[in-house]
Image: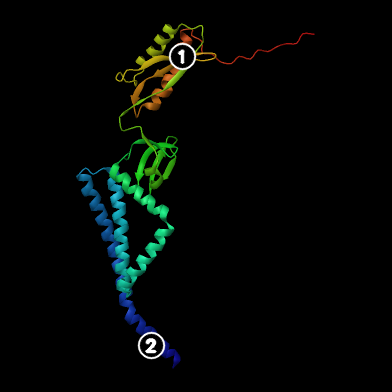
Amino acid sequence: MDLQRWIDKGFALIMDFGPKVLGAILIWIIGSWVIKKLLKTTKKIMSKRDYDESLQKFLVNLLGWILKIVLIVVVLGTVGVETTSFAAILAAAGLAIGLALQGSLGNFAGGVLIMIFKPFKIGDLIEAQGELGVVKEIEIFTTKLTGLSNREIIIPNGALSNGNIINYTTEGTRRVDLTFGVGYDSDIKKTKEVLMNVLTSHPKVLKEPAPTVNVSELADSSINFAVRPWSTADDYWDVYFGITENVKEALDAAGIEIPYPHQVEIQKQG
């Protein structure tokens, strides 16, 4: 009799909650599919209207989180959980989580500020928080960079929005700062001509702004020249490394010495 009573109760529970559980599962499946389609459509609409790529990803990511929370509330309501009570619990939990995760909220606020003021966009080369890289993705809480050695760099948006940001891409051009030293016996005028010829003959050095060569320092063992070519942001490292190599070859060909430490071996006679 006891077994039959438990079977009857189990059957009754299945009859009461089975349709609700199945309905909740169905709502979850359909809702997830609808959210996916909605986010895809939203992204297409923003792309057609030429929304900034950084803003697109940020808004789609934010909208996805909001829709998923709404879907969870609907599913719980279908199962029989009181949504009003759930909302109160969610609000209390949100407050507690907010106090515990102040840093995350700061990162969220930082992400919003980045979207509003746009100090950089995806594809820009920036330097921030001691890191240098190309902006790969701007998310709700973090920004991802691709470092020059192809490292993935993740910076919290809170720190990023509150710190100094150097954007090397905004102006479209960059100045390459190089310094070369020659011996004190070298002719300054001839050295400047050799260095300038190297700059003007490099295919990726811009004519405007014009490159410059000037004596920057009379050091202990060398006359130092400040060599300042300009390039596009994309060609910076090609110009940096190319000019460095070409200057060494040109100075050698012109017979101009680049000072370096010499070791003198003293032999004892006895």
Does residue 227 sit above or below 131 in this rendering? above
Quick one: SS at disc 1?
A: helix
Screen quadrant of the N terminus: bottom left
Residue 153 vs residue 48: left or right? right
Tell me what residue is drawn at x 37 percent, y 44 percent.
161
| Location of residue 200 by image quarter | top left
Q: Quadrant of residue 15?
A: bottom left
Q: Earlier in the sequence, mark 1 or mark 2?
A: 2
Q: Position of residue 210 (x, y in %)?
A: 32, 17
Residue kind at label 1, given as amino acid type? Glu
Under mark 2, the amino acid is Asp
Cα separation, mark 1 vs mark 2, equals 94 Å
Q: Which residue is mark 2?
A: 8
Instruction: Work out which residue is located at the far left of the displayed protein and give it.
Output: 49
- Please determine whether, in this image, residue 152 is positioned above or below residue 68: above
Taking the image as drawn, is residue 164 in sight?
A: yes
Quarter of the picture holding the C terminus? top right
Badge nearest the viewer, 1 or 2: 1
Question: Horizontal and vertical percent for residue 109?
Answer: 34, 50
As drawn, which residue projects farthest toward the right? 270
Front one among 179 and 159: 159
The circle on residue 18 is none
Compared across the picture, whether 259 is left or right of 227 comes to right
Say left or right for 203 vs 259: left
Is residue 22 visible from the viewing direction of this image? Answer: no
- The foreground one among 176 and 12 is 176
Q: Which residue is mark 1?
A: 249
The answer to the question of whether label 1 and label 2 lie on touching residues, with beta carbons closer than 8 A, is: no
**Drawn side of residue 59 relative to residue 159, left or right:** left
At horizontal 29% and vertical 52% (from top left) the residue drawn is 60
Occupied quadrant, residue 160? top left
Residue at (39% x, 59% y) in the render: 98
